[in-house]
Image (cartoon, helix red, strand yellow):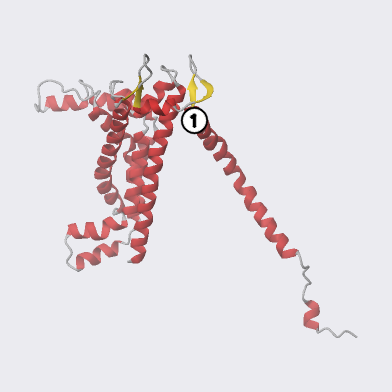
């Protein structure tokens, strides 16, 4: 005769260590799933970055490469010029001017892209579903071709016998061709043309999710169009603006192809200077130091942007 109730007898017995074992297996499976991503990031991102940082603290070899002797000469060379006779240092602004020109052009291209991209993204976000798909397709269409071909198209448009000069002369705006190439204007136009979709797409994604009834409610409360834009649309699009600005500014800052083709080699940017150090100058440590300085500048921008995005989300949640 059994003294255990029938209901308790039918309940399956569970061993004491089963639950911790299952948790450990799930933890191990999660680690294994993350492992390929960690390996890819380590091999293709962390290791090259460590090599660049290491090279920047070494001495250059005579015909390229490095000598494995610790030196900070590459960073010193960025700000100072060493006299070959008495070994004294003199402050040199040449590389600072190149870096400043790169930042100026990147900021200009970002601002112009924002001015063009915001109304474009808002227009697309307020269309019907079918029209949205067609317009987004047209925006992404240039990415189906190589950046070299797109930059060469800008070269054909802006040259002396290009489309711009032909139309202007045909309309009697001026009589002789105007030189648009091989200056800051040409490089800025090339940067805007190359990276404008990077501004439009994040803005569209942000504006498309916005509740349009909020805009209608603002107009019902007799708000002016300017007040609706500054107090309703702009706050909701803030994270898209920051994301778009980053996606345009960062590649514009380190670009190599656009200034090489549209600047004619006469206007060096930081990307061209880095390539020159690893190529013609054979000064690998200085090229690596320039890359580290560029990376540090981008990290500062990313940290500031992250703080802005966090503040924007907190402000929206506060409402």
Q: Is residue 9 left or right of residue 198?
A: right
- Give residue 301's quadrant in the image: top left
Q: Quadrant of the N terminus?
A: bottom right
Q: Where residue 150 sits: x, y (%)?
A: 34, 29
Q: Is residue 178 left or right of residue 22?
A: left
On screen, residue 30 above or below 211? above
* Residue 129 in sight in this render: no
Q: Where residue 303 sits: x, y (%)?
A: 39, 47
Of all residues, the one furthest to the front in this rendering is 86
State how many labels appear.
1
Q: Which residue is mark 1?
A: 52
Q: Residue at image x 45%, y 28%?
A: 72
Q: Is residue 116 left or right of residue 42?
A: left
Q: Nearer the viewer, residue 230 or 318?
A: 318
On screen, residue 58 above or below 123? above
* Residue 67 in sight in this render: yes
- Give residue 104's quadrant in the image: top left
On screen, residue 221 above or below 176? below
Q: Residue at image x 36%, y 21%?
A: 88
Q: Where residue 253 sits: x, y (%)?
A: 35, 34
On screen, residue 268 above or below 201? above
Per the image, label 1 sits on a secondary structure element best described as helix
Q: Is residue 66 left or right of residue 221?
A: right
Q: Nearer the viewer, residue 52 or 178?
A: 52
Q: Residue at image x 31%, y 39%?
A: 196
Q: Where residue 239 sits: x, y (%)?
A: 35, 53
- Circle 1: is it few (<14), some (14-19), or many (20+) Cα within 10 Å? some
Q: Quadrant of the C terminus?
A: bottom left
């Amino acid at each position: 005769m059994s003294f255990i109730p029938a209901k308790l007898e039918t309940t399956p017995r569970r061993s004491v260590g089963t639950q911790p074992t299952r948790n450990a297996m799930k933890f191990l499976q999660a680690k294994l799933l993350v492992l390929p991503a960690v390996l890819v990031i380590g091999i293709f991102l962390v290791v090259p970055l460590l090599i660049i940082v290491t090279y920047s603290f070494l001495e250059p070899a005579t015909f390229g490469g490095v000598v494995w002797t610790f030196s900070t000469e590459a960073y010193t060379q960025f700000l100072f010029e060493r006299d070959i006779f008495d070994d004294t240092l003199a402050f040199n602004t040449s590389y600072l001017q190149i870096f400043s020109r790169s930042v100026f052009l990147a900021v200009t291209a970002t601002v112009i892209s924002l001015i063009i991209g915001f109304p474009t993204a808002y227009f697309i976000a307020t269309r019907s579903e079918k029209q949205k798909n067609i317009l987004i397709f047209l925006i992404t269409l240039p990415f189906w071709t190589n950046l070299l071909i797109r930059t060469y198209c800008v070269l054909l448009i802006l040259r002396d016998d290009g489309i711009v000069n032909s139309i202007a002369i045909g309309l009697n705006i001026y009589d002789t061709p105007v030189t648009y190439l091989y200056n800051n204007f040409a490089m800025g136009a090339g940067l805007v043309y190359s990276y404008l979709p990077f501004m439009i797409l994040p803005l569209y994604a942000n504006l498309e999710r916005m509740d349009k009834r909020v805009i209608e409610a603002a107009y019902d409360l007799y708000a002016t169009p300017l007040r609706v834009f500054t107090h309703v649309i702009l706050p909701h699009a803030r994270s898209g603006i920051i994301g778009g600005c980053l996606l345009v500014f960062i590649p514009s800052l380190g670009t190599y192809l656009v200034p090489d083709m549209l600047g004619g080699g006469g206007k060096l940017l930081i990307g061209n200077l880095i390539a020159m150090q690893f190529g013609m100058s054979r000064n690998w440590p200085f090229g690596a130091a320039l890359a580290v300085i560029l990376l540090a500048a981008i990290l500062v921008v990313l940290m500031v942007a992250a703080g802005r995005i966090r503040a924007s989300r907190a402000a929206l949640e506060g409402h």
